[in-house]
Amino acid sequence: MEAGGPAVVSQWDECFQAAVQVAQRAGQVIRKAFTEEKHVSTKTSAADLVTETDCLVEHLIISELRKQFPSHRFISEEATAAGAKCELTSSPTWVIDPIDGTCNFVHGFPNVAVSIGFAVHQELEFGVVHHCMEERLYMARRGRGAFCNTQRLCASRETDLSKALILTEIGSKRDPATLKLLLSNMEQLLLAKAHGVRVIGSSTLALCHLAAGAADAYYQFGLHCWDLAAATVIIREAGGIVMDTTGGPLNLMARRVVAAGTQKMATLIAQALQPISCGQDDQA
Ligand SMILES: O=P(O)(O)O[C@@H]1[C@H](O)[C@@H](O)[C@H](O)[C@@H](O)[C@@H]1O
Ligand SMILES: [Mg+2]
Ligand SMILES: [Mg+2]
């Protein structure tokens, strides 16, 4: 493009800009509510919390995006919890977690984020994750690199499990059999001499830390498509790998993931895990 020539407008520019703007506005609402009294309800278990701010922020995001893009489809955490169908079609689809880290939000623990992913023909085009308590905006568009604010992100190159910092999440399924498998998986990785295993209470922020090279791998059974969508683009554009726990390609709806800076690390993690059955987002 010659200097001063018309800006090249590529497809989905307008959607990406709208995602950045509404993620920032949502972050302002969450930051304001962070220190205020909260009305807490539970969903699938006593550990699966939701507040009025989750619902308010989800409504703010969707109503703004629907105004600009009325033909688009939406998948979001709280609408799904209220019975909406969770189905990724070939239509332009927004995949939204209004507050990832609601339990943290309720307790005043600052790992809290807004996650907005966007897919067309079931392919992820961009992701925006706003770490609203630290004013960090993680973002990536397919083929154009990953960034945190203005800093380019590069995932870890580590291939040795005994030199790895590994992130995971506990989720809200707390029956004894699930907890036994969950702790056994952590034990296997620690017996393999991993430097450490960390749980920070927000899967989407943990995945962004991986994209930034601050950890070497992430795995989880039980997260949702709205946790994964945006962060998957960010990790891939940072040079990382996001795949199914079986070692096959990622299925956004399968509620399980292994992510790492390198394919070798991702494979080593997947091989160490015992599977935990958590259903699928697109199966009621
Ligand atoms: O806060 P929500 O969005 O309900 O849940 C978050 C992640 O989605 C979930 O995967 C993770 O396990 C949980 O710790 C975190 O709060
Ligand atoms: Mg949430
Ligand atoms: Mg979440």
Image: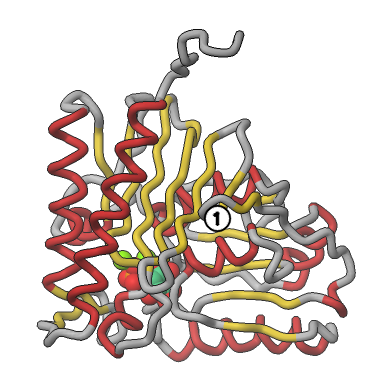
Can the viewer see residue 242 in this picture? no
Asked if residue 230 lies left or right of residue 242, the reply is left
**Residue at 25% of width from left, 33% of height from top?**
73
**Residue at 19% of width from left, 74% of height from top?**
32
Asked if residue 53 lies left or right of residue 206, the reply is left
- Badge 1 local density, few (<14 within 10 Å), some, or many (20+)? many
Give the percent coordinates (x, y) of residue 155: 72, 57
Which quadrant of the frame does ligand 3 lie within? bottom left
In front: 8, or 225?
8
**Residue at 15% of width from left, 83% of height from top?**
40
Amino acid type at image mark 1: Cys
**Residue at 60% of width from left, 88% of height from top?**
183
Residue identifier under label 1:
148
Colour style of the rendered protein structure: secondary structure
In front: 44, or 10?
10
260 vs 194: above or below = above
